[in-house]
Each structure stands twice: as C-alpha cells, then as structure tokens.
Amino acid sequence: MSMGGLILISALSMGIIGAVLAIFLAFADSKFKVVDDPRIEALAGILPNTNCGGCGYPGCRMLAEALAKGDAPPNSCVAGGSAVAKGLAAYLGVDASGHKRKLAVVLCRGGNIEARRQARYTGDLSCTAANLTGAEKVCSYSCLGYGECVEACKFGAMAMNGNGLPVVFYDKCVGCGACARACPRNIIEMHDEDHKLFVYCRSKDKGAVAKKACDVSCIACGLCVKDCSVSGGIVVKDNLATVNYDLAPQNAESTGRCPTKCILFDVESGSTKQNFTATLARRAG
Amino acid sequence: MKLLMIFISASVINNFVLTYFLGICPFVGVSNKTENAVNMGLATTFVMTLTAAVTWPIYTYILVKFNVPFLEFVAFIIAIAALVQLVEMYIRKSSPALYRALGIYLPLITTNCAVLGLALFMVLRNYGFVESVVFGFATGVGFTIAIVLMSGIREELEFADIPKPFQGISVTLIIAGMMALAFMGFAGLIRG
C-alpha cells in the first residue's frame, strides 16, 4: 500500500471511530440527561466554598442543594456571616433576618502556669489520645493543650499560646464550630457575638478539689450569683457557676469579687491575629 | 479450562498492579480507606470488563481489517474515554447515590494506564472475544484485590510509629514493593 493510501485509511478509520463514538455519546447525553436545578450553581457561587461543615451539611454544595429545595434557611451558612445570608436571601427572595454571628469561646484558663500536674504524658500528642489516659493535669475538665482545635480550624483563627492554651482570633473566627466539635473535653463553646460574660472554667469538682487542681478554677463559692443584679442570671450548677444568657446583664458587676478570677467580662474582644503575633514578637525580644 | 487459567493468571499471578506496575496512581492515591478502595476497585472492574468488550471488536473489525493496527493506542484511548463518559452519564441518571459515592473515581479511571494496558495485552496475546472479556474482568478483580489489601495495611499504618522521613507516600511505596515481592512468588505458575 502506498504511503498516501495508508495515511488516508488511518485518518478515515480514526475519523469514523471518533464520529461514531461522538454520535453515540451525543445520543446518550440526550437520553440520560439529568436536569440540575440551575439555582444550585448560583447558590453554590454565593457560598464561601470552604466546606467547613458549620451548617451541618457535608459541604457547601450540599447546602446549596438544600437551599434550592427550601430545606435550609438562608442564614444556614455560619462561615459566610450576614453578607452571605443577605446574598442568599436576595437570590431566593426570602427574608434574611435572624442571622447572628457566632464565635468560639475557650472556657478554660488553666494553662501550664495555673494548672497542677500529676503525671507525665509521653503518648501520642493529640488531645483525643491524651484524654483517654487522663493526661497530665490534675483537673479532668481542663484543656489538654495539644491543639486539636487549632488543627481543626480551617480559617487560621486559632493558635496555641505560650501557656499551652488555645487562643481564638475574633477577627478571623467565622463561628463554624469545627474547634468545638474537635475538642474531646468540650471546653470550647459557640456563643452569640453579644455574649461577653463567661465563666472560664468547666470543672464540676467540689470547690476544695477544684482549688487544689488549678489556680483559676471555679470553686462554686456563689459570690457571682449574689453580685448579679438579676436573680437567676447566674446560677451554681454541679459545683460550677453558669451564666444564664437570657437573663444575665452583660456587664462586669458580678465579676469583681470572684476569688479565682474565673468569671470575667469582655476580656477577649481584643484577641486578633495581629495582637497575638505582636505579643509573641515582644516576648521573643 | 483456558478461561479459568486466564482468570487466575490475570487476577493473581500476573496481577497488573503488583507485577506489571500498572495503575500505581490510583493504587497509592485511593487506598487510604478500605471503603473507598472497594468502590474504586468495583468501578475499575466494571470499566475494564466493558473496555475489553468494546476494544476487541474495534481492533478486530476495524483496525485489522483496514490493515492499520498501529492505530491501536489512539483508538483504544478514545474508546475508553467515551466508554467512561457513557458509564458516568448512565450512573448519574439511574442512581445518583452511586454516582455520588463513586464521585471522582470514574473520571480517574479514564486516565488509568491499567485499563489501556489491558486492551494492549489483550491484542498482544491474540485473545478471542470471550477470552478478552474474561481477561478484562479478571484484571479488574486483580486490581481490586491489590488495592483492598493495600488499604487494609494502610489503615493499620495510621497507628504505627513510622520514622518521619518515611511517613505518607514513602512507606506506601515501600509496602507496595514488598507486596509486589510476595506476588512475584507466583510467577511462572501459569504461562501467559
């Protein structure tokens, strides 16, 4: 066979194979067409696409599908904040009210300096593993300090400080709750932005035991309960002072006489990434 | 009898992954969880069987007939790509749940060299149509065996104390090498 003939046959046979497959695929495409709701694409475009899971769906796309179906309210996206909620609501033509910014709060201040230790832990350096053994600190409600919450944060909004405690940067925190879910001791809670008064302790041990374990533990003395101007605003439950956010006024009136300084008002609003790095730099030299 | 021989040969003795080192990319990439590995193995087996069934007629009735067998590479790649597209469309329509479970694995198979290798070996060994289909299925079973074994080992590795330089892909490749050594022991049991 001549060279030209060979080339012709090659080109033709490949062309035919390609054409047949193309026609076949085009036919199959029309037959197996799946009609996607076009709003899903648009809604997914509005969402931040960080797939943080804060909304309760496995990813932003799943939330977009739920939004299109009307299964999820437009303020479901915690990471996007009110801007995204407004965008989604405008697109869907519904009301966006009711969005409140949530923030993560670390409710333990018993770091390396404040908390007593009873053992040396040499196992796997993760909170989950350490929690199984009881870990180093005497207080079994305390922060373990291996930073699983920091690892869980997808927004760079957390870091471990020099005292072995996690710090939340409130300029970065989007309130997705990943850190709270990661913490095996449930020290991190998600709170509305306007909550400022916190009991920074989760210890349910009796006062004397808690006091021995940690300098900044709640010893359930009840002084904050007495100082709170609204009755029932703060209650002592299971040897632990607990703020009732529906009642308690968000001010410093109940914090003054706390002997261990574990109930505090508005101490963390200045916690930003910039301040944190500046503090580190100042300490370093 | 010959079909049984082809099946055992392709699935165990001449395992594509562990003796020919084809399809290492998904073998390493998708073997971190057994569940994923099983899905990937099943999807690959399905596509491989279909590939054998489709590429054999293309080779025999078009390429050989027109005396252009050197086009096998191009023709097979097109055929495999089109086939995977078709399977993807069909699954998406018929079972969205399976479609979501397979996810990226289906498109991944398009570029899996084990699938192309299967089509080329089939031609090289002069298999008939039924033999080719059995060969395709057996190759897929072999791939599934390899990837599931690997995923089991890797799940255990999560808890092993591995020196830092070996963590992750390095230790996976070393284990793949050891598994390949073990499978080499079967070599020569069956010709072909």
Image (tube, rainbow, N blue to C red):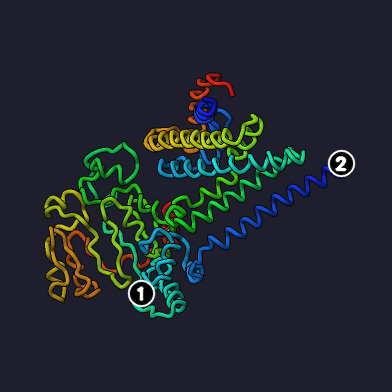
- For mark 1, does the 10 Å Cα neighbourhood hold few (<14), some (14 to 19), or many (20 or more) residues? some
| Left or right of residue B74, residue A86 in this image | left
Which amino acid is tagged 1?
A: His
Q: Which residue is mark 1?
A: A99
Q: Is residue A14 left or right of residue A158?
A: right
Taking depth in this image into account, of A82 and B29 the one nearest to the observer is B29
Q: Position of residue B71 (x, y in %)?
A: 73, 41
- Write down the chain letter for disc 1: A
Whole-percent x, y for residue B43 in the image: 49, 45
- Using a 10 Å C-alpha cutoff, classify the residue at mark 2 as few (fewer than 14 neighbours), some (14 to 19) or many (20 or more): few
Label placed on residue A3: 2
- In the image, is A152 to the left or to the right of B44? left
Q: Nearer the viewer, residue B173 or A4?
A: A4
Both on one chain, marks 2 and 1? yes
Where on the picture, by quarter, is residue B156?
Answer: top left
Residue B112, above or below A85: above
